Image (cartoon, rainbow, N blue to C red):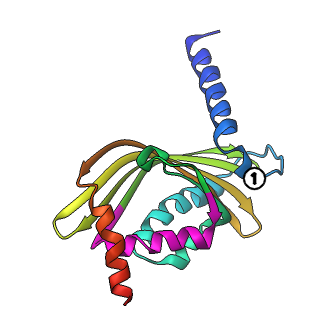
Amino acid sequence: MSPVTRRYVLASAVFAATSTATCAPVLSTTQSTAALTVEDRTVIAEAVAGIGLYADLREWNRVKSYLAARVTTDYTSLFGGKVATSDRDSLIAQWQDLLPGFDATQHLITNIVVEGAGNDAVARSHVRASHWIDTRFWTVGASYLHRLVRTPEGWRVSAIAIRRLYEEGDRAVLTAAAPRVSAAAK
């Protein structure tokens, strides 16, 4: 076996083990091995990028259009805690209770690579997410893993995991944002 083949086999085994161990419950139970089309890959990449873009623009109905009915989120590398699963409306409500408290947010999502077959896909990407209040900011650089499932309405994100690579700025702006949302609502 050539070194390239060994690396491919090893990488495939690691990917399969990681996929099974981390998010198996959120994958579709429909077993299909049909290759993803170019159109599938484009729609999947748009969903990944669209969630970040429309959250930054506070266009919540557009964010909702990319999410499955139930979404698993893994923010443990950023905040500790546990992996959570909630319905999409609850997840969007959590984001609405925080993101509008910043003067600006920007999720730059790049290098989207899509893998999968049939009704299940995984998109891996990089993200640089900046959160600003006045001149204070907190930026996190990370990798994303989005799991998607084909539904009758199209491809929908069923799981989002972020793996922190680095941080810059003042993480305390996070605690300042939520009270600003509450104050604006009064």
Position in image of residue 44 (x %, y %)? 59, 57
Residue 181 position by quadrant: bottom left
Position in image of residue 38 (x %, y %)? 63, 53
Residue with the most extreme top position: 1
Q: Secondary structure at mark 1?
A: loop
Residue at x 39% of width, y 87% of height: 185
The residue under label 1 is which amino acid type?
Asn
Residue 102 position by quadrant: bottom left
The quarter of the rendered structure image containing the C terminus is bottom left
Q: Which residues are magenta?
A: 85-106
Label 1: few (<14), some (14–19) or many (≥20) C-alpha neighbours in 10 Å = many
Instruction: Say whether residue 144 is left or right of residue 41.
Output: left
Residue at x 62% of width, y 47% of height: 122
Give 62 or 132, whichever is nearer the viewer: 132
Residue at x 82% of width, y 50% of height: 29
Q: Which residue is mark 1?
A: 119
Rendered position, 120 above or below 104 = above
Give 97 or 67, whichever is nearer the viewer: 97
Rendered position, 21 above or below 1 = below
Any magenta on residue 92? yes
Residue at x 59% of width, y 67% of height: 66
